[in-house]
Structures are given as C-alpha cells and as structure tokens.
Image (cartoon, helix red, strand yellow):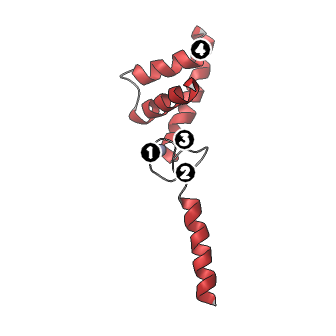
Amino acid sequence: MDAMRQSRLSKQEKGKNELKCKICHRNVEKKGYCGFHVEAYKNIIQKYRFWQAASGISWKEYLRKIADSPLTGEWAREVAKHLIKVEKT
Ligand SMILES: [Zn+2]
C-alpha cells in the first residue's frame, strides 16, 4: 500500500518537473523560462525602460537591436530572438 502511494506521489512530482523552458530544455524556474533565461528576460525588460525613455524606440526595434548586437550575451540574445518570434504571431 505504501509503495503504491509513493509511486503516485513521485509521478506527480515528475510531471511538475517536466515543464521546460520556452527556449532551452532546462526545467522552468519562472514565467516559462529557466533560471538563466528568466534572468536575461528581466534584464531585457529593465533596459528597455531606459532605452525607451532615451530614444523612444519601439519594443520590436529594441528586440531586434538586442538580437543583432555583438555586445549582447548569449542568454539575452536567445530571449530576444524568442520574443521576436512570439511577437510576429
Ligand atoms: Zn532556458
């Protein structure tokens, strides 16, 4: 009996862990992203406020700039590309 209950429990936990990041195959941490990509996502949002205030750039233009910039880190670039793809639809 105990073994049955345990296996049901572990199945539920497994299902929870099967949620994957929208971009890579790591487990989801927050907002559908893994720990690395959610950090990059937060950075992108934060920086956009400055960019928009300074130059009035649109969200899409900003994302394209990030995706194209050689200064962008790998994580942020992946998030930007993902967001561009999502915005198109
Ligand atoms: Zn990820």
Residue 8, how many percent across, how many down? 61, 76
| Alpha carbon distance from label 1 to label 4 | 26 Å
Amino acid at circle 2:
Val
Dot 3 falls on a residue whose secondary structure is helix
* Callout 4 amino acid: Ser
Separation of marks 1 and 3 at Cα, in angstroms: 11 Å
Question: Residue shown at 46%/22% (left/top)?
Answer: 66
Which residue in the structure is indicated by mark 1?
24
Query: How far, Cα to Cα, is label 2 from label 1?
Result: 10 Å
User: Which residue type does callout 3 highlight?
Assistant: Val
Query: Sequence-wise, which precedes: disc 1 or disc 3?
Result: 1
| CB contact under 8 Å: marks 1 and 4 | no
User: Which residue is denoted by mark 4 in the rendering?
Assistant: 58
Tag 2 or tag 3, which sits nearer the N-term?
Answer: 2
Label 1 residue near ligand 1, CB within 8 Å: yes
44 or 88: nearer the viewer: 88
- Find numbered disc 2 in the image and state the secondary structure of the residue it sits on: loop
Quickly name the residue at label 3: 38
Q: CA distance from mark 2 to mark 4?
A: 28 Å
Q: Is residue 85 left or right of residue 53?
A: left
For the view shown, which residue lies furthest in the top direction? 55
Residue that numbered label 2 is attached to: 28
Residue 13 left/right relative to 76: right
